Amino acid sequence: MSSKSFDLIVNKKINSYKKSIIVDSDKSISIRSFLIGAISQNISKIKNALESEDVLATINCLKKLGVKIKKTTSKSYVIYGKGLGSFEAKKNTKLNFGNSGTLARLLIGLLATTPNIEIYIQGDHSLNKRSMEKLINLMAEFGASFSPRKKVKFPLKITSSQMPVGINYNAGVSAQLKSAVILAGLNSFGNTTIKEKLRSRDHTEKMLLKNKQAINVKNGKEKVITIFGKNYLSAINVNIPGDPSSAAFFTALTILNKNSNLKIKNVGLNKTRVGFYQILKNQGAKIYFKNLKNINNELRGDIFVRTSKIKTISTSKAYYVNSTDEYPILFVIAALTKGISIFKGIGDLANKESNRVREMQKILKQIGIKSIFSKNDLKIYGKGMFNANNKKILVSNLGDHRICMSTFILALLTGARAKIKNFETVFTSAPSFLKIMKILGAKFEIQK
């Protein structure tokens, strides 16, 4: 399922540009569309789905669970929904989540309360290193069990609950754990209640909203989601916008590159996903959202970006929830902005595809950027824009798409000679990334 391995070599700065691009479709919404379509009644239709490795892993897992999915045209699919609790798998079936933490946590949420499930679950070498302890403990509350006992990393065996009962959950910063609880609650007896103080991404609940018999969302000081278990779900029709996380890298490049303008068309602008853009706007970045429209309960529009002079960045933990994926590229921006930038409450970045704080510190150090991490906070001593064509950056095989993409941007802006190993990992989320870079004029070499 993974692409052929290759390394990327970058050793030339990028020139100025004025371009219009379309980024890859939203990964989070794509994965959720297939999962929710599979447990809904009748036929669901998905348009403009992301066809990346993470989404293809989702489709493969669902097919192994007895779901019929048919591709109709490019990026368009129909899902023949089986309804709640209807997944079926032979004993000892193996599901591979690939690199996708989203797929792993959300599908395990569904499996935990589906009767008669006893299967093996695993990911790629990167996902298998990530702790699933919080997820395992939550699913145990629904009655699911995992073996070997006390093991918290893949591969594992999951045995579903035979009598799942709804739970009460105080959500933290993880939208994936929140979504796992929502999905597990759908096929549990009684109600599941989720209370949320910090608003994490809300695609799962938005996609379910028309099913008033199954879900209620109250937005107040504290958001309360109530799941009414064992109710049918209506089929969904989803047209998926561009991914704001993928767009963030091109936005960062444009802000820091001299005399450049960029229009990014049809990007998802859900308010729980635009923390990155808000942080930069607050610091003086010329970023504008235009042509806004609401489709399938999701706001979308075009992003206009211009070269900008920005101030040093200072973020609180409140920003982390809505810009989690973008912190590696924020670190790059901080390194190339003169002064000390401070990122607070980011300890959870240690449990991503890699330890993103530590790995980005190593990369920045290679071009002479000082940083200090203490407890949950990171300080970056930015130099401003500078030439690093006498410096070399080496990124080992981390299996982390965001680190690879961020390092590429860093090299293009500084002229550092970068060798990024196993760059194919970027295709888990952004298969068009290198094509778009060519459109913008980036020069790079692929080494197989």
Image: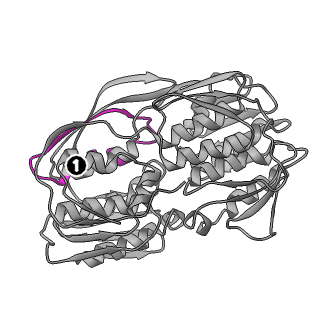
Indicate left or right for 343 with 151 as reference: left
Instruction: State the residue at coordinates (70%, 40%).
Output: 183
Indicate left or right for 63 with 85 as reference: left
Query: Quick one: SS at disc 1?
Result: helix
Residue 43 belongs to magenta span: no
Image-quadrant location for residue 155: bottom right
Q: Name the one closer to the observer, 193 or 433.
A: 433
Disc 1 crowd, CA 10 A, few/some/many (<14, 14-19, 20+): few
Image-quadrant location for residue 351: bottom right
User: Residue 253: x, y in percent?
Assistant: 23, 52
Q: Quadrant of the C terminus?
A: bottom left
Q: Name the one closer to the observer, 206 or 20.
A: 20
Indicate left or right for 419 with 120 as reference: left
User: Residue 315: x, y in percent?
Assistant: 37, 57
Indicate left or right for 309 with 349 as reference: left
Q: How is the image coloured?
A: one colour
Q: Which stretch is magenta?
A: 256-283
Instruction: State the residue at coordinates (62%, 26%).
Output: 209
Image-quadrant location for residue 420: bottom left
User: Residue 136: x, y in percent?
Assistant: 74, 59
Residue behind mark 1 = 438
Total numbered circles: 1
Q: Is residue 370 visible?
A: no
User: Residue 283: x, y in percent?
Assistant: 24, 50
Instruction: State the residue at coordinates (75%, 36%).
Output: 186
Most distant residue in the right direction:
163
